[in-house]
Amino acid sequence: MKFLTLFLIFVIASANIFDVQANDLPSLAFKRIRQFKYTSSGTLKRRNQSNLTDVGDDTAYISTVTIGTPPQAFTCQIDTGSSDLWVPDVSCAGAGCTGKHGFSSSASTSYGGDGVPWNISYADGSAASGVTATDIVTFGDVTLQGQQFARATSLNNNFQSQTFDGIIGLGGPQRASVPGTVTPIQNMKNQGFITARSFGVWLGKSTEGGSGEITFGGFDPDHIVSDLTSIPLIASFDSTGDWAVQLSQISIGSQNIALTQANGVAILDTGSSVIFVPSTLADQINTALGAVFSSQAQAYLIPCDATPPDMAFTFGTASFTVPGTDLVLQQGGGVCESAIIPLDVGGGVSFLLGDTFLKNNYAYFDMDGSVIGLAQAKR
Ligand SMILES: *[C@@H]1O[C@H](CO)[C@@H](O)[C@H](O)[C@H]1NC(C)=O
Ligand SMILES: *[C@@H]1O[C@H](CO)[C@@H](O)[C@H](O)[C@H]1NC(C)=O
Ligand SMILES: CC(=O)N[C@H]1CO[C@H](CO)[C@@H](O)[C@@H]1O
């Protein structure tokens, strides 16, 4: 997840939340979601997907991405909080690059040449730089011609501990480091694989066998327990390409915290393992969970055998749950940390609802409909 500091005028769409199954809503998003659910041929064409691997007990979800001819394979973290696709270059040297696969442009007969200098930095302090390029890119079932990506010739030490090679950003093109970038999701539409710039994300749990799945251009009805509820994207974030939605309340057991337009902006971020909350709310939430801040650990610690209450995240009138058991993170040596972690993100964003939230709730990211559809996930 990467952020720019922007001064935004808040023109937040009124809490226009509706159930996708309702019959009297003329909205385009409604029709599109219905259509995806029941159309197996025609405009949607056949389902295109990518399987995901759950790594580090739900800390990251990765997909194999191949680049070039013959294909060179990389593991990329799927990140809805950023919009760049990059892999390490074969020339990448230094601690951040150790053990990762490197792309060799000279070994690809379809290499489209170098573009412009490129760099990106993420909210956790990790940073990469190199050069943009184009080549054939395969992501799950989809093969994209002339796809832009970046060859990272330098990765900072933050990447040393990461088990994946690169990152595939699934945010809007406005979030891309290089203006004018055509993202893989945009290219899937341009090249006729999908009719809308949308995708559905199911994240498994390591305790239940792991794995995960992205469905391009639609969602997978096999991984939702009920119909999707459409939550409008916040209009003022159109210019940032962020998947930003408006939280109205969070609940910890029976304790409710009401949120305002100003302090309830949440990004649904597959690239964050946990749930990041504003530092001003972290004490209240963690106290209700039974977690206590340790200045030594610089973290909210919680007994590993604790059974904290469930949390609910409310968008307008629709609530989505995270079970208390998923809020206790094993850190090794009998130490456990709360999954509710303070982070002042900036840019008008208060919450990053990461994998802790998304492995419990299926999310359908629809850029063309300007909505995110949510439903409780089904294994
Ligand atoms: C990153 O790229 C931006 C935009 O091209 C440039 O202004 C900036 O100097 C670059 N930063 C680094 C550290 O290379
Ligand atoms: C994803 O996994 C399913 C089930 O194992 C398999 O049938 C499908 O071919 C896989 N898709 C890709 C793109 O590997
Ligand atoms: C596996 C699968 O269903 N792939 C489909 C992806 O979309 C293209 C274009 O519609 C189809 O040709 C593929 O069969």
Image: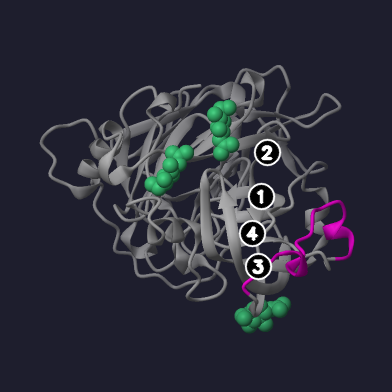
Q: Earlier in the sequence, mark 1 or mark 2?
A: 2
Locate residue 232, reporting x and y percent.
30, 49
Q: Nearer the viewer, residue 353 or 297?
A: 353
As measured in the structure, the alpha-carbon distance from the residue carrying label 4 to the one carrying label 1 is 18 Å
User: Which amino acid lies under the numbered mark 3 shown in the image of this protein?
Assistant: Ala
As measured in the structure, the alpha-carbon distance from the residue carrying label 3 to the one carrying label 2 is 24 Å
Query: Would you identify the image quadrant in which residue 169 lies?
Result: bottom right
Query: Would you identify the image quadrant in which residue 18 lies?
Result: top left
Mark 4, residue position: 123
The quadrant of the picture showing ligand 3 is: top left
Mark 2, residue position: 59
As measured in the structure, the alpha-carbon distance from the residue carrying label 3 to the one carrying label 4 is 19 Å
| Residue sitting at x 45%, y 68% | 174
Relative side of 147 to 37, left or right? right
Q: Nearer the viewer, residue 113 or 162?
A: 113
Are the residues tagged 1 and 2 within 8 Å (C-beta)?
A: no
Query: Would you identify the image quadrant in which residue 216 lies?
Result: top left
Q: Which residues are magenta?
A: 93-112
Q: Nearer the viewer, residue 224 or 102?
A: 102
Relative side of 344 to 199, left or right? right
User: Which amino acid lies under the numbered mark 2 shown in the image of this protein?
Assistant: Thr
Helix, strand or loop: magenta stretch: loop
Q: Does dot 2 land on a helix, a strand or a loop?
A: loop
| Residue sitting at x 74%, y 52% | 165
Q: Earlier in the sequence, mark 3 or mark 1?
A: 1
